[in-house]
Image: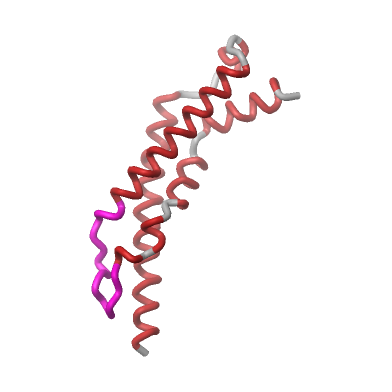
Amino acid sequence: MSNLNFNCVKILDIGYTIAIYVVLATIISVYIDKKLGEFDPKEADKKSTYKLIGECMLHFWLIAVLTYFARNLVKRIPSPFDGIHGFKHTSLQEIKNAAIFMFILLFFQDNLHDKLRYIQINRLK
């Protein structure tokens, strides 16, 4: 029964941690997309393929750096489940791996998606 209790607490803490990542990623993603604005194909026509790819690479770099900071931030947010039935929040793998944060951040980057589609359709064929 103790193992069952421990696993239930762990599952609840996974949900708590994922919720923090999703909310944080959504807020940051909306902010980035608003700052960059809508992708303009007419402006992209004036740029070289290398410049467009470079802009995408910078965007991916920004996402990677933000993921690093998010992971370190979430590590420091206390969990209401820490210590219950011997559970240690800091040992949770979801804290060490911010994959869900990166996924949500990438998912909502409309500017980046549009730019990548533009490169694929207009420059790589």
In the image, 19: left or right of 108? Answer: left
Residue at position x 58%, y 16% in the image = 44
Task: Using the image as rendered, state which of residue 99 and residue 13 is in the foreground.
Answer: 99
Task: Say which quadrant the C terminus sits in.
Answer: top right
Q: How is the image coloured?
A: secondary structure
Q: Which residues are magenta?
A: 74-88
Task: Say which quadrant the N terminus sits in.
Answer: bottom left
What x and y, as percent, mark residue 28?
37, 38
Q: Is residue 100 above or below residue 11?
A: above
- The rendered magenta stretch, by its main secondary structure, is classed as loop
Does the segment drawn in magenta span residue 36?
Answer: no
What x and y, as percent, mark residue 70?
34, 46
Task: Using the image as rendered, state which of residue 85 and residue 114 is in the foreground.
Answer: 85
Residue at position x 26%, y 63% in the image = 79
In the image, 3: left or right of 118? Answer: left
Label tally: 0
User: Could you say which quadrant of the image residue 95 lies in?
Assistant: bottom left
